[in-house]
Structures are given as structure tokens and as C-alpha cells.
Image (cartoon, helix red, strand yellow):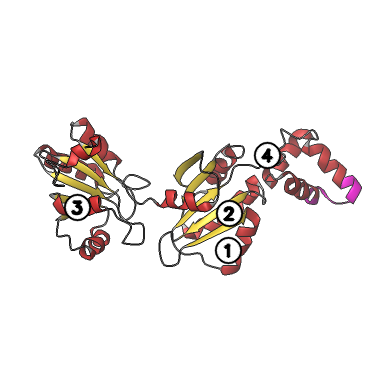
Amino acid sequence: MRPEAQTDTSNGRGTLGPGSSLYLVATPIGNLEDITLRALRVLKEVDLIACEDTRQTQKLLSHYDIKTRTVSYHEHNEMTKAAELVVDLESGAKIALVTDAGMPCISDPGFRLIALAIRHHVPVVPIPGASAFLAALVASGLPTDSFRFSGFLPAKSGQRRKLIESIRESPRTQVFYEAPHRLLETLADVVEVLGESRHVVVAREVTKIHEEFLRGRAGEVLEQLKARGDVKGEITLLIAKAESGELTAESSSVTVAQQVREIMAQEKVDEKSALKKVAKERGIGKSEAYREWQRGK
């Protein structure tokens, strides 16, 4: 028997073993069929299910005729609720932790309870399953040999742009969650900071009825979404690493300032138009081109 199976089974009968345990159970991110047999068994056999939203979890439990008692555990009550649940665990209870969708603790509540359970020497057992960012990553068409998942992007534009700037020359695929009402602003920031030619993928409503993948250059994807109007659904945004042929201010033998002056002189255009052209040719954002231009004056 594999080591992880020994944690939650006994005598090979597929029942939970003696003693308390905290089970981290992955739930479907859309399609209710995306749940493992092990997860269903654990949800049926534990004493209590701690849910991010009991109403949301009840839909899953009703679908599979699971009668286990539920209790609310979310970001607004986890400070006190974590301590209460650990008291139950220390008394011998078996508790499953679930969130509305996907794996607990991935951009969802759970860390406080898990850390507290470990501190009190309560076994913590992961029950793996669906995860939105992994599903989006493997279907994106972007390299998966090296990637970074950073959860939700900052809501404030300045902080978001700073983060995007920090990944300009990252050698790995970047994966984020984003709110649908901020997606257009975020893509505009990507175009501004990383350039309109940077490859991106917008994965929308993964595993749900209206699942969609928009793949292409950042500028193209932005215009495509602008034409639609409102963007709805759960969004995973993936940003490709810079292409090897893309020029940056550091790698180009001709500085941004030199190139701007040449374009202004040769094409008889103003500073703003020259900067815009240089940024596009180099695959960098207009703000970065402007900073380089100011440094080179």
C-alpha cells in the first residue's frame, strides 16, 4: 500500500482510519463530474465538512447524495473558526476542508486552519483534484516546463503595473487569476508595459458550459475583448515569457533615445509619435520607452 493511502484507509476496505485528520478535498471547478472517487468517499465518511460557502457546497453534496454535516469556514471567520475546528480535531474528529471550487488554500481560505492543525500535530491529508490554473496552463499552448502562479493580480493599477514590469524578462510562463470586470484594464497594462506583441492566453470559464480560450498577441486579444463589451465568467490570465528575438532597452545596441531622435528627424514626427513607434518595434511598453528616452536626453 502506498504511503499516502495508509493515512486515510484501514485494512484495505477504503474506510477512514482511526484518529483525527484534516482532509483537504479538491472539488470541481465547474463540471460536477470532475471529482475523484476518493474525494467522494472522504466527504461521505468524515464527521464534518468545513465549507467556504455552505450553499455552494450543498449543490455538490446533493448531487452525490452526501448527507455529512457542514459548517461555514471563510476568510471573514477563519480567525476564530480555525481554533474551534482544531479543538474538534484534537477531540478525535475527522474534518474535510473544501472551498467553492478547486483545491483549498489556492487563492482561497484554508492556510490558517492547516497551519494550526500542523502545529497541534493533527494529520493533514491532501485529496488532490481539479485546479483552475493548472487546467488553464496545460491547455494554453504556452510552455509548461517552467511557470509561476501568483494568484490574483493587484486591483490597483499602479501595483498591477509594477508587478507586470517585474516579469518583463522572466524566463517562465506567468499565471494569474483576474476579476472579469478588471480584465480589459489589465490587458491594457500588459500592452503598455510589455508591448502589444507579447503572447497571452485568456482562459475563461474553464470546464464550464461556456469554456473558452483566447490565444494571441496581447494587443490582438485586448481588441477582441473590447469589441465584445462586458467580459463575464471566471478568468485565468497567462502571459508568455519574452520571445528570444524581442529587443529590450538593455539588449539593443541602439538606445531608445538615439532611435527616437532618428525617427523624429527622418519621419518629421513629434516626440510622442516617435516614442510610440519605438515601443512597438522593441516590444516594450510606452511608459518604459518614455523612461529610457528621459534617461537618454
- For the residue carrying disc 3, how many other residues have a C-alpha within 10 Å: few (<14), some (14-19), or many (20+)? some
Instruction: Give the magenta part as a residue range.
Output: 264-273
Which label belongs to residue 225? Answer: 1
- Mark 3–mark 4 distance (CA, rounded to whole Å): 49 Å
Quarter of the image with the N terminus in it: top left
Is 137 one of the magenta-colored residues?
no
Disc with the residue nearer the chain's start (1 vs 4):
1
Disc with the residue nearer the chain's start (3 vs 2):
3
- Please give the residue where the numbered disc 3 appears in the rendered image: 41
* Res 61 quadrant in image: bottom left
- Please give the residue where the numbered disc 4 appears in the rendered image: 244
- Please give the residue where the numbered disc 2 appears in the rendered image: 187
Residue for point 41% across, 52% down:
132
Q: Nearer the viewer, mark 2 or mark 4?
A: 4
Residue 183 coordinates in the image, percent (x, y): 52, 57
Disc with the residue nearer the chain's start (2 vs 1):
2
Is 220 left, or right, of 80 in this rendering? right
- Mark 3–mark 2 distance (CA, rounded to whole Å): 42 Å
Residue 6 coordinates in the image, percent (x, y): 19, 37
Q: Nearer the viewer, mark 3 or mark 4?
A: 3
Do the CB atoms of the residues marked 3 and 4 lie less than 8 Å apart? no
Q: Amino acid at mark 4?
A: Ser
Q: Nearer the viewer, residue 131 or 100?
A: 131
Do the CB atoms of the residues marked 2 and 1 lie less than 8 Å apart? yes
Residue 127 coordinates in the image, percent (x, y): 27, 45
- Mark 3–mark 1 distance (CA, rounded to whole Å): 42 Å
Q: Amino acid at mark 2?
A: Leu
